[in-house]
Image: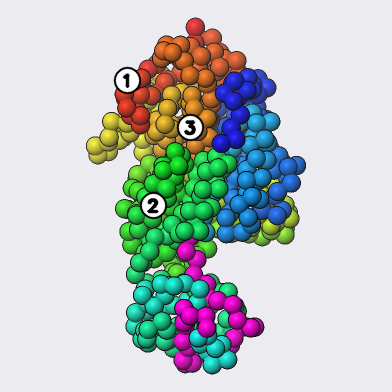
Amino acid sequence: GMHPSLEQECAIRPARRNRLADNRGMRTESAAAPSARRLTRVVATLGPSSSAPAVVRAMVAAGMDVARLNFSHGAPAEHAERAGRVRRAARAAGRPVGILADLPGPKVRLGAFAGPVELKTGDAVALTTRAADADPARLVLPVDYPHLAVESAAGQTLLLADGAVRLRVRRVAGERVLCEVADGGRVSPRAGLALPEAEAVRSAFTARDRRFLDAALGFGADFVAVSFVRRPEDVLDARRFAARRGAAPLVVAKIETRGALARLDEIVVAADAVMVARGDLGVELPLEDVPLAQKRIVAAAAAAGKPVIVATEMLESMRTAARPTRAEVSDAANAVLDGAWGLMLSAETAVGAHPAAAVEALARIARAVEPALVRRERRRVARPDGGLGVSAAVADAGVLVAVEVGARAIVALTRSGATAREAARRLAPLPIYGYATSPETWARMTLYRGIVPRLLAPQPTQARLLAKVEADLRARGDLARGETYVVVGGAPDEPLGVTNQVSVRRVR
């Protein structure tokens, strides 16, 4: 990847933070780490409006935690260049910014034909996968998806023009799918075609996605998002592909199909994180069903302790306006209160007029409502119900102990990121510093709610590592002599991903 060396990173010391406490008794963080007092992560898409180095730097300064590269647009070489700019801006700011490669997946589209076609309710329309057979004048439209006839069946509904035009399948004849127009309208060439009731016959991780993921691994992407996931295997295919290339990015499953909602729990187990992709979800479902689907997806991720990002049209009016609407502010705030770990900006920052201002607005909204979330979560954590796994129980205990003894901070010592993720589930009312010794884990923590990622060079013993952690916390002004902090982590001889130790320490 393009990570700076450990030595460079360890030498970065943001300005000593001041001693004032904010409204939750947390000390204010230096300007170099705007996300430290904010728990929710801001994911922002880079595009034509946000490719210039100065704009990327402004977005990092405004609080961007993860930069999304949307492989549905632009060449891999452009994305590689943007990733390099993000890494340089992050290094200058003294904090990590994660890189998310968002793969296009099997987006089904009509083929190319001359001009838009008017479909009237009741018309007979044929869709064909053989371009040579297409005849738009006689309502025989080409479809750029070889599996259409195999996945379609009589009685199914197909959606065109973002769901405005609905077709009902009458029958399948060879490579043609014969339909009746249920809701008419105008259809343009290359328009998206949604198959909400189709039986998936191929992976959402396509040959094109493989090429793109190869490029993304080349520039060290920390996260990969798989689009149009319909089954857990889609997620595993992407993870196996990366593993064969010696990489282990976190795999984000985008929930945007009915099929994904039907198998939500299995997909959440298979994925490292999930995204509520409200754009295509709102095509496959009636729009009024999307809010409850969002809550259901966020709750499923929360139950599994996995990061969840709410995406699409978060601050849509900021494509052109300098400020969001009140409804958008309320939507973003409610996503935080639902339990989202991250909020995502798409067109607002990719092609919008005010990319850094959109990041800043989202960060400000999250910061304003988080105290209510922490109070609610703390009541829940204080009475753990049901049996927890060892790692979850130990992380729970660490937060409870820290609160009981009046600790100043929690330190999560994390090799794989698992301890930091367990701590992130808890929404502790005090800062959690995630200390990693690998740049990969350090970058991965940019998606973990409420964790301040820190990087240290590896040490020969646990005692030396703890001494380095304490020295680092003191040098940054996070802890003073005599103050208490709680450490959670795994014993050095335990396998990766196990959190089994809590210790209470005082700064000597």
Residue numbers of the magenta segment: 105-132
Q: Where in the figure is residue 123, as x and y percent of width and height?
A: 49, 92
Which mark is first along the chain, 3 or 1? Answer: 3
Magenta span includes 419: no
**Three-letter code, disc 2:** Asp
Rendered residue at 71%/39% (across/down): 57
For disc 2, the marked residue is 237
What kind of colouring is applied to the model shown?
A: rainbow
Disc 2 element: helix
- Please indicate whether residue 17 sits to the left or right of residue 140 in the image: right
Give the amino acid type for the residue marked by disc 1 in the picture: Asp
Mark 3 belongs to which amino acid?
Answer: Thr
- The correct choice, above or below, for 85 with respect to 187 in the image is above
Q: Judge left or right: residue 251 versus residue 52.
A: left
What residue would you read off at disc 1?
493
Give the spatial CA distance, label 2 vs label 3. 22 Å
Please give the label number shown on residue 441.
Answer: 3
Sequence-earlier tag: 1 or 2: 2
Residue 471 picture quarter: top right
Q: Does residue 107 belong to the magenta stretch?
A: yes
Residue at 32%, 59% (x, y): give it.
263
| Residue at far front of view | 132
Task: Name the N-terminal-most of marks 2 and 3.
Answer: 2
Q: Where is the N terminus found, in terms of image quarters?
A: top right
Q: Report x, y in % for residue 234.
A: 38, 55
Cβ atoms under marks 1 and 2 closer than 8 Å: no
x and y percentages locating residue 82 in the rendered image = 66, 45
Q: Is residue 95 left or right of residue 258?
A: right
Q: Residue lying furthest top in this view?
A: 508
Report how far apart the C-alphas of labels 1 and 2 lie in the structure.
31 Å
> Where 55 falls versus 488 (above or below)?
below
